[in-house]
Amino acid sequence: MHLNERLQPDSKVELMPAVISPVIGQRSAALWKCSILRGLVGTSLVFLGYVSLVDAQDGSPQTVELAPLISRDGDNTDSAARAGVDEVTDTPFAETSDEPLTDLLRPLNPNILNRPFGAEPDSAPDSESEINLDQWVDPEFDAPRGYTGLSGIAPEETQSSGHFVPIEDRWRAGFPEWDRYGKGYVPGDDVPYESGNWWDPYNQNVLKGDYPIVGQHTFLNVTATNFLIFEPRSLPTPTTPFESTTHPDSPNFFGNPNQLFVSNFTRLSLNLSHGNASFKPPDWQIRLTPVLNMNYLDVNELGIVSPNVRNGTTRFRSRNALEEYFYEQKLADLSPEYDFVSVRAGSQQFVSDFRGFIFNDTNRGVRLFGTAYANRHQYNLLFFDQTEKDTNSQLNTFKDRGQNTVIANYYIQDFIFPGYTSQSSFHYNRDQPSLKFDTNGFLVRPDPVGVFQKHQVEAYYFGNAGDGHIGRFNVNHAFYWVIGNDSFNPLAGRRVDINAKMAAIELSYDRDWVRFKTSFFYSSGDSKINDRHATGFDTILDNPNFAGGGFSYWQRQQIGLLGTSLVNRFSLVPDLRSSKFQGQSNFVNPGLQLFNVGMDMDVTPKMRLIQNTNFLFFDNTNVLEQFTFQNDISRSIGTDISLGMEYRPFLNNNVVLTAGTAFLLPGAGFKDLYRNPNSNLSPLYSTFMELDFTY
């Protein structure tokens, strides 16, 4: 008897543990034991077996043969055996039991899904020209998330079957709307798959490289930045002669130290790249970054903004430049782990070590770089043919500087200790003889000290650095040894051979939301100014993030001394150099010893506080004594106390407010250099606010 026979009321259907063979493969009989069969989801089944009809009154069973059942549209009376089961063995049939069992078990799925494997549709088209897409599928697409722009992928494939809809732009696949909390899309709520706008950098955006702009693999990333610096400060400021001073008849050598500096950088970076950057480095990329700077300086003494005292005490300058312009090409993939080697040519930024002790600059050069051993090793080889920089904005010009720099370094991750990275490096700097007055009219090459003569500096740096953690302790360290020669050092008044050293170490420990740290920095000083050995350490173009970095008074300010600088802006080394950006390295200097203690505190996810205290000492004062014609200058520079804050109001880097204040409590050596006769030297201060908007 077949399943199309009528069942009595209160009867039920049960598949016995017999031979049950779906066409999709053998399954356990127990898996298919059920009472009522419903429509199959996604396929049709063929069963061989028996059905037991159990009378609800006396429990007498009747065994019924279950014939092979194949059906497509539910019209065949044998279609009751389609699978997809719902066990309701304790629920009797209703009074409508006079209906065919096939009606009671009518499938719930679209008919196109009910035909068995291998069967063709009844009216399959013979050719592509006869295809009626509406007959097969009428898909509805959800909107892709964010701002996608127009697709750059031209359709090449047409629909040939109702089973498949060609979607060639795989990036712009849509997602359904999702009111995650059922509040009706309240502004500010976390709503997944949110739509965006062209001006929205937080959600997905074709202008931020989230969607390709051309084809499947070419992306455009537009980054616009406005960076404002507002900086009141006090610096030792010399007065001008009696006849042209702002304070007539003033006998003091140092005048009013208060100054105000304001600077604003507006950058637009355009980066066009090709590849799958999420999985491997780009095949090629092009970057252009034009920059506009406006800066203003207000001081209280003449001869500071310009050597011409008629220019007063204020200065406003503006400058535009093409700061970055380069082309990068991947040369080869070296391993299945996407190890690669690439080359980049043009003006580009590069930091030569973890903290920027020796070289941190954007300039014209060629870089060969890549990875090895599944990205555990990285390497760089660079040649810079440096250009002249603008004096007040430090932006690049297109004028040749006459300075060449070669840098090679190699990184090894998980070196000895997991989480610790070691770096070995080599720097070569060749600064050719030249004469240069800056845009304000001050002499910067050669340094306006000692004997005035053009000279060449040639230096070779050998270094090793490390960064990471060893157990619970974070460690960062660096050591550099520099040798070479200076054809005619202006302070020594002769040719000198360079042999100097630098060392730095920082140890820190994380405790919940606080990082406690201590550090030490050493740069050797020159003990004899007139001999042929230059043992004072100097850098190429540094910008170290160490011992407080830009929050520290000593590092943030350029402290002038008799036509040159005791220390340059954003530098640690007291190198007696006219300008870090336009002057030449000077290896006849007093050197530095710095001891630091500090804390970094993540007060909230939005706010971080940075506190540092630095104790500063000259390594050797012989050079200073000869240069300033003073005896017995103390080694103590003073105590530098700083407190800084970083605040991200939207928990991202689109808006960042950075502020800080620092005080230098002068030590005996600093007072020997900058104190007026018969007076005391007050603490010096530096206060700043930086507002960074990024799109």
Image (cartoon, rainbow, N blue to C red):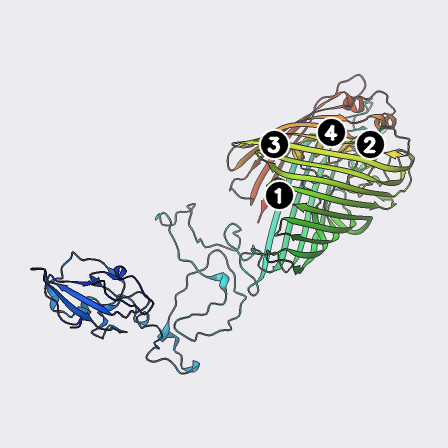
Instruction: Tell me what residue is drawn at x 69 percent, y 48 percent.
Output: 349
Q: Is residue 166 left or right of residue 587?
A: left
Residue annotated with mark 1? 414
- Residue 694 visible in rendering: yes
- Nearest-to-viewer mark from 4 and 2: 2
Q: Nearest the camera: 134 or 619?
A: 619
* Distance in Å between CA atoms under marks 2 and 3: 31 Å
The x, y position of residue 661, in whole percent, is 63, 30
Amino acid at circle 2 = Asn
Q: Which mark is residue 589?
A: 2
| Lower position in the chain sequence, tag 1 or tag 3 | 1
Q: Secondary structure at mark 4?
A: loop
**Where, quadrant-wise, is the N terminus in this rendering?**
bottom left
State yes or no: discs 4 and 2 in contact (Cβ < 8 Å). Answer: no
| Lower position in the chain sequence, tag 4 or tag 2 | 4
* Distance in Å between CA atoms under marks 3 and 4: 32 Å
Residue annotated with mark 3? 508
Q: Secondary structure at mark 3?
A: strand
Q: Secondary structure at mark 1?
A: loop
Amino acid at circle 3 = Ser
Amino acid at circle 1 = Asp
The x, y position of residue 600, in whole percent, is 58, 32
Instruction: Tell me what residue is drawn at x 53 percent, y 51 percent.
Output: 201
Check the image and report above or below for 290 versus 614. Answer: below
Residue annotated with mark 4? 235
Check the image and report above or below for 58 versus 655. Answer: below
Instruction: Tell me what residue is drawn at x 31 percent, y 65 percent.
Output: 41
